[in-house]
């Protein structure tokens, strides 16, 4: 029988809520810090399939989360498309050449850069308890494009937004290329053992409504449609961070199986405005998990109660912070697992 998380993503509204946390495999865990110190930087960890599988499994062993999220990065896709990728201490990721300076056609694809990720999925799936769900993921095209164009992260995605206005045909070609590689990448993860996949659109909130329709909804819909055609039993979770009032349109028009919502969304509003019966995921503020205490419990219960009438995966509104105390995660899990709708 599929695990609680997978059943929920497929539309079952069980009285108990499955729970996993974005970035649950990461720097807040002492076992992760020890392995990273032993192995070196972030990218070497991602490309060491045995180490990446171990990191993916660490929070499952410690906390028993209902889902194991692949340890990797959204920028593996542009790396496979031919850009050079570096993670610099204190600076974050850098891609070169930047597409604000160089044509997409100048890149030479290196698809074998995806193979170690598939091996990680295979190793995790083989080790994962039967009642846990293996989650794959990829970045959504708009967010991936912002890094490919600018070469790094930015506060307002200025270079990419300007390019999309200035030369929409060239930018559309970048988006289309990312869609194609992302579909193949997710398909490879599913074939290796991923039971559900999530599309992260971390910078969706930087776009005006018309641009959101073109650069967020349309490409995510294309990916969801093509994954559904090839893998009809594999749920696709869409997570358009910062979508705000555009979230219902995203949910209706992309065709994703479930929608992740960030901490800026009122869960009562989301429960009312999103399509009836659509599974939702979220949306506790990660800073509440950092703070702990009575307010953590009060706000977590508010999220649980808001979504009592629909399938709901409890999660954060974004990734867990690196300084989050282990005991606060344990506090949250005890509350979620004790709740009954």
Image (cartoon, helix red, strand yellow):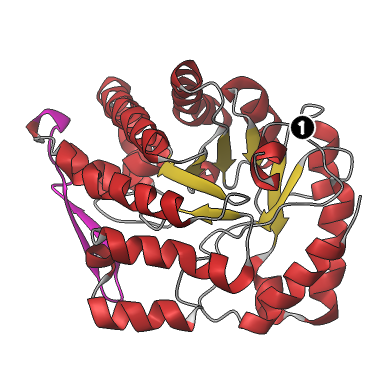
**In screen coordinates, is 99 left or right of 316?**
left
Q: Percent x, y for residue 266?
A: 79, 50
- The residue that mark 1 highlights is 274
Q: Quadrant of residue 250?
A: top right
Q: How many marks?
A: 1
284 with respect to 238 (left or right) = right
Foreground pick, 145 / 9? 9
Q: Which residue is depicted at the point 30% across and 29% down?
A: 166
Of 217 and 57, nearer the camera is 57
Q: Residue 11, how many percent across, how many down?
A: 74, 31
Residue 86, magenta (yes or no): yes
Residue 80 falls within the magenta-colored stretch: no
In the rendered view, would you say 282 is above or below 32? above
| Whole-percent x, y for residue 234 in the image | 54, 30
* Residue at 65% in and 51% down: 262
Instruction: Give the quadrant of the N terminus.
Output: top right
Q: Does residue 108 appear anywhere in the picture?
A: yes
SS at mark 1 in the image: loop
Residue at the extreme top: 229
Chain part drawn in magenta: 82-105
In the picture, measured across the screen, residue 172 lies left or right of residue 209, that is: left
**Residue 81 vs residue 120, the one in the foreground:** 120
Q: Residue at x 60, y 22 (%)?
A: 255
> Residue at the spot x=85%, y=79% of the render?
294
- Residue 291 at x, y percent in the picture: 70, 80
């Amino acid at each position: 029988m599929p695990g609680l998380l997978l059943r929920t993503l497929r539309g079952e509204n069980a009285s108990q809520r499955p729970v996993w946390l974005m970035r649950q495999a990461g720097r807040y865990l002492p076992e992760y810090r020890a392995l990273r110190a032993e192995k070196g930087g972030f990218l070497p960890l991602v490309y060491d399939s045995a180490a990446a599988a171990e990191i993916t499994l660490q929070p499952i062993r410690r906390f028993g989360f209902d889902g194991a999220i692949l340890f990797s990065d959204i920028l593996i896709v542009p790396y496979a498309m031919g850009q050079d990728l570096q993670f610099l201490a204190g600076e974050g990721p850098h891609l070169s050449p930047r597409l604000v300076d160089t044509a997409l056609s100048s890149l030479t694809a290196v698809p074998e850069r995806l193979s170690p990720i598939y091996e990680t999925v295979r190793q995790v799936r083989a080790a994962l308890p039967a009642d846990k769900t293996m989650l794959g993921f990829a970045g959504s095209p708009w967010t991936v494009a912002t890094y490919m164009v600018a070469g790094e992260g930015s506060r307002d995605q200025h270079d990419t937004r300007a390019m999309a206005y200035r030369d929409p045909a060239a930018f559309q070609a970048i988006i289309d290329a990312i869609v194609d590689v992302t579909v193949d990448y997710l398909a490879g993860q599913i074939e290796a053992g991923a039971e559900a996949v999530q599309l992260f659109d971390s910078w969706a909130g930087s776009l005006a409504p018309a641009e959101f329709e073109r650069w967020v909804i349309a490409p995510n819909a294309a990916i969801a449609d093509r994954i559904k055609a090839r893998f009809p039993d594999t749920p696709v979770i869409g997570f358009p961070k910062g979508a705000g009032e555009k979230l219902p349109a995203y949910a209706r028009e992309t065709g994703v199986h479930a929608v992740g919502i960030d901490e800026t969304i009122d869960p009562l509003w989301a429960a009312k405005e999103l399509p009836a019966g659509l599974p939702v995921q979220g949306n506790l503020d990660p800073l509440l998990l950092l703070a702990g205490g009575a307010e953590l419990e009060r706000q977590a219960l508010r999220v649980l109660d808001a979504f009592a009438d629909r399938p709901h995966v409890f999660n954060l509104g974004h990734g867990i912070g690196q300084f989050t105390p282990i005991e606060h995660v344990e506090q949250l899990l005890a509350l979620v697992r004790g709740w009954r709708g």
